[in-house]
Image (spheres, rainbow, N blue to C red):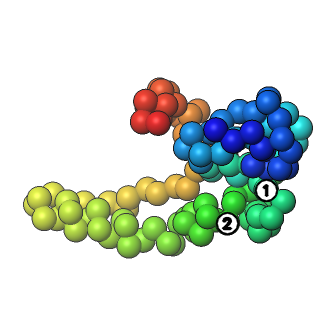
Amino acid sequence: MATQCGVCNVNSNKLSYYKFWEESVCREHASDGTLRCYTCHRFKKAQDPEYLDLNDNGRKLCSYCSSIATLDPKECMPLIQNVREFYKSLNLVVDETIPFLLVDKDMMFKFIPGILLYMIRLV
């Protein structure tokens, strides 16, 4: 494991290791205001490009997450059409409008109890 922080490049013996990112980070960054991606929770490094500001409650996305994020419900129309085609192939026709909302994870946790436990098990 590295002894150098992946965010500030300081050598330290007080690092937290993030296995998914294979990265060590000073423990202080968790509470010192260092910017984190709202989606993947990766800490922003000095050399990283600017994060995308979602202009709501300070949420920001790293360049990777912003490149794959769906921010406009219209972008989901092909997915909805695929769902309709799938049901049609099973002779289950859906005539009603399929409600589709883009929500953040906090809203999902509020309305779908237990989803956090499910997500934790997947990790």
Left or right position of 51 against 8: left
Q: Looking at the picture, tell me which residue is in the foreground, 34 or 69.
A: 34
User: What residue did someone put label 1 on?
Assistant: 45
Mark 1, secondary structure of its residue: loop
Q: Residues within 10 Å of mark 1 (few under 14, many from 20)?
A: some
The amino acid type, in three-letter code, at marker 1 is: Lys
In the image, what residue occupies the spot 77% across and 54% down?
44
Name which quarter of the figure residue 15 lies in. top right
Alpha-carbon distance for marks 2 and 1?
12 Å
In the image, what residue occupies the spot 59% across and 69% down?
67
Q: Residues within 10 Å of mark 2 (few under 14, many from 20)?
A: some
Q: Is residue 109 above or below residue 43?
A: above
Name which quarter of the figure residue 96 lies in. bottom left
Q: Looking at the picture, tell me which residue is in the foreground, 68 or 71.
A: 68
Q: Is residue 4 visible?
A: yes
Name which quarter of the figure residue 95 lies in. bottom left
Residue 45 pos. (x, y %): 79, 56
The amino acid type, in three-letter code, at marker 2 is: Ser
User: What residue did someone put label 2 on?
Assistant: 63
Q: Is residue 57 above or below residue 49?
A: above
Q: Residue furthest right?
A: 32
Left or right position of 109 against 83: right
Residue 24 pos. (x, y %): 70, 41
Q: Is residue 71 visible?
A: no
Residue 27 pos. (x, y %): 79, 32
In the image, what residue occupies the spot 84% across and 59% down?
46
Mark 2, secondary structure of its residue: helix
Q: Nearer the viewer, mark 2 or mark 1?
A: 1
Left or right position of 110 against 13: left
Q: Looking at the picture, tell me which residue is in the foreground, 60 or 43.
A: 43
